[in-house]
Amino acid sequence: MSGLIHLLNSHGLTEDTIIKATFYGIAGLTVLFAFFVVIARNIFHSALSLAVVLIGVACAYLYLDTEFLATVQVLVYVGAIMTLFIFTIMLTADVHKKMSLKINPRVLLSAYAAALILIILIKIINAGPWLPEVKDAVPLDLAQLGRSLMTNYGLPFEVISLLSLAALVGAIVIGKTEKK
Amino acid sequence: MIPQNHFLILSAILFAIGIFGVLTRKNAIGILMSIELILNAANINLITFNKFQKTPDGLGQIFALFVIAIAAVSAVIGLALVISIYRNAKTILVTKINLMKW
Amino acid sequence: MVKFAHLIPIFPFLAFAILILFGRKLKRSSAIISIAASLISLLIVILTFHGLLKGQGSYKLFDWLVFNGITLRVGVIVDPLTCTMLLVVATIGSLIQVYSIGYMSDDPRFSRFFAYMSLFMASMLGLLLADNFVTLYMFWEGVGLCSYLLISFWFEKASAAKAGMKAFITTRIGDAGLLLGIFLLFFSTHDLSFSGLSAITGHPALYTTAALLIFCGAIGKSAQFPLHVWLPDAMEGPTPVSALIHAATMVAAGVYLVARCFALFFTHQPALVCVAYIGAITAIMAASIATVNNDIKRVLAYSTISQLGLMMIGLGVGGYSASTFHLVTHAFFKALLFLCAGSIIHSVHTQEINKMGGIFHKMKITGTAFIIASLAISGVPPFSGFWSKDEIMTEILRSGHPMIFIAATITNLLTAFYMFRLIFLVLFGKPRSELHPHESPKTMAIPLIILSIFAIFMGLPGSPLMNNVFQRFIYFGAEHTALSSNPDHFVMGISVIVAFLGIGIAYALYMLNKEILSKSIRNRFTGLYDLVYNKYYVDELYEFLFIRPCARLSKAFSGFDLKVIDGAVNASASMVVFLSKAKAWIDSNIVDGTVNMIARAVGMLSGELRKMQTGYIQSYLLTAFMGLILILLLKIIGG
């Protein structure tokens, strides 16, 4: 790995440049697939695109020094939630039936609204002002994270687990067929 | 290093796309997937601020974790509802389900 | 020291909550929940008692209300008086609930009964633990409510429903006095805690009034003259209720209240003398009524009133220890008497003592318990009643009120007489009607046995035989130092003579020369007999003084209503009819036209607006997002 970096360095590419290049590449790919998620004619294809987007977001997490969350993202989203989505698609819709995104006034209006929101958000982001960035923050290690999850944030943690349980029971109740 | 704003813009783009999806997809599953996009956008924001701003005890990460958990929960309930609706109405196209129309 | 006294009322209250919510499903097991809660409370009471002996005192729980800078501190009082009362209430309450399993076994509202009993236990225990007037008043009303609910428990019976109302309204008169007394104290001292009572000085007239108003509450609750009329009627309720609420515990709350505020009464002697005289009037009057009444439960009710009067006398002459001592012993033997009466009623299905007779050999346990309790209440040594009555008599003599001493002695004579009249008429002799008595089930018999033991031995702690432990435990001020080391043999002698005299008269009248002698006496004193038999016409007097005028006033109002107001209404009505006819023309021609036009306009407009209600969720969402964008834009533009 270091050899590779060295090689690249010798060609005038610094480590920073490499990081930037890969990040923008991944980000662009993520946005592209995100578009595909919402405009794909086949729902199955859009599910697969969503998986790519989720992995892309996991990569973004890596750039933000949160390896643990990246792992969780891949495990929970790609591993569990995507599987659920695909199962549901199999169980309900006719996979091969294509659904076109017809251009009608509402779609146009929605596109306009989404674009407007994006513009406003970017305006807000660029306008700032943000608190000064912490440059050389030491990334939180996993043990610390776990400790604070069990101590300071113990109550929300328990609430979430209760919520999960409720959802579990609720999903079973909603999903089961009534005996006749 | 990549500046904070670029992460935020990535998040904003994903959010806008998600909103577009929620507003336009006819398939209920598609709507749920768009919601996942929105939640991911929010998560990117949380983690970005966790890195670039001073946060105690990894607050942003923990929040992101909770958001992931809640996303899982909402997906489970949403998909259960979709199956249940499909069983009753024989369709998951929200354009066909208009019980709310007077 | 662990502070857990405030947990005592919580368990019965939980039991109440469970039973009132799930009583229908629990059915028979509701009794177990209720009794278990009482037993847990009893356990905590014992622990508290232990703590008290170890030196634990009252403690504060929390600050409740703050008004005008005055804070109401809610706490728990742990002192000898409260602890003793707690023990009595918890013990008797548990026993009576066990008894109720048998007594109420056939009742369709079985679990409801236990729910109310638990609520009563919670309120009563809370009342005893209250350390200020506000919480006391809360629980005071709580027990009043339970009393009402339980008296009219068989509300299908009109007389029971009426009795419940009578009890509630009559005690309410006293409660109003209590409330006024509390207000008066609050406005003059800004302190509602009991501990602050001893510090009260100045304004003797004001504080005497406050004491008398508080005593009004006690009069109502403890059925003292002139508010005694509700208690005999309260016997319409189930017998365990009569035993627990209307004999042993709730009616004693009035006595407890006076004892609790004794510091106030003691420093304002006129109020104390008033207490003594009210007690004396009540005692002798109720005792005399009891000698001629023919309903077993009502006789016991009048006996209760009379004994409560005796306790009031005791307090009134300054015999704080003596009075609370009698309160304790009375609670046990009167509860026992009621339970025995209940057992007899349960078995022979009548309350008329003229129809009973000779059931002793069929109901040995009940009969024996009844006799023990009667001996105790009559004051035959060495049963409990003897010692406690003796203490009160000694105190009266010491205080120097000869009239009251005579009244109390006559009361004791009458007490012995009417109790043995009951015994001879109910248990012995020949049956006066077709009876099929049988011994009651075990759940009823066992509480009787336990209470009998208490009725026999409960007097010992306060007797010279055990060195007056009780009086050294519960006392007011430096009272116990005044205890004479050697008992007053004069008073004891009189007590014993009076008791045996009463029993002897009863024996002569009802066993030796049945009917004949009693009838001849009855004939000789017809006027007096009628007066007493009709309960001194107090009910009739109230009917004449309050209820009839009230009804007449209502009727007068109703007449006024009919003639004057209705006339005016009718006249205005005919005017209105004329006007309406005129308006009807305008209406149909002018107004309707306008209305129809508006309606049509609205219809057209809504037809357009209706198109917005597409029923598509995404349309609604889109609108919502538009709103969000608008807000964001405003935010940006507005800076």
Image (spheres, coloured by chain):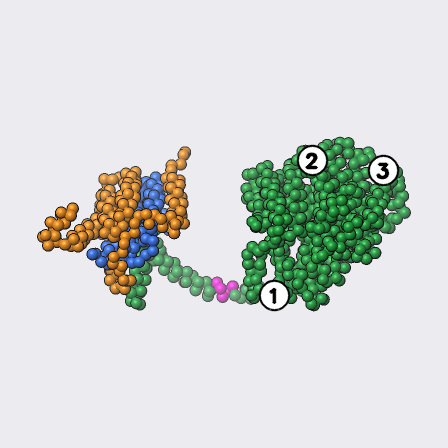
Q: Chain B appears in which tint?
A: blue
To which chain does the residue with label 1 belong?
Answer: C
What secondary structure do most residues of the magenta stretch adopt?
A: helix
Residue at the spot 10% in from the left edge and 54% down from the top edge: A12
**Apparent side of residue B97 relative to residue A111 in the rendered image (left or right):** right
Q: Residues within 10 Å of mark 1 (few under 14, many from 20)?
A: few
The first of marks 2 and 1 along the sequence is 2
Residue at the spot 21% in from the left edge and 56% down from the top edge: B2
Check disc 3 and report its element: helix, strand or loop: helix
Pointer 3 with pointer 1, Cβ within 8 A = no
2 vs 1, front mark: 2
Q: Mark 2 highlights which residue?
A: C445
Pointer 2 with pointer 1, Cβ within 8 A = no
In this view, the residue in front, C98 or C522, is C98
Amino acid type shown at disc 3: Met
**Apparent side of residue C525 relative to residue B25 in the rendered image (left or right):** right
Q: Mark 3 highlights which residue?
A: C511
**CA gap, disc 2 and disc 3:** 28 Å
Q: Evaluate whether residue C384 shows in this view.
A: yes
Image chain in orange: A
**CA gap, disc 2 and disc 1:** 72 Å
- What residue span does the magenta drawing correspond to? C584-588
3 vs 1, front mark: 3
Q: Mark 1 highlights which residue?
A: C572
Residue at the spot 85% in from the left edge and 44% down from the top edge: C501
Amino acid type shown at disc 1: Ser
To which chain does the residue with label 3 belong?
Answer: C
The first of marks 2 and 3 along the sequence is 2
**Apparent side of residue C356 relative to residue C241 in the rendered image (left or right):** right
**Quarter where residue C116 is shown:** top right
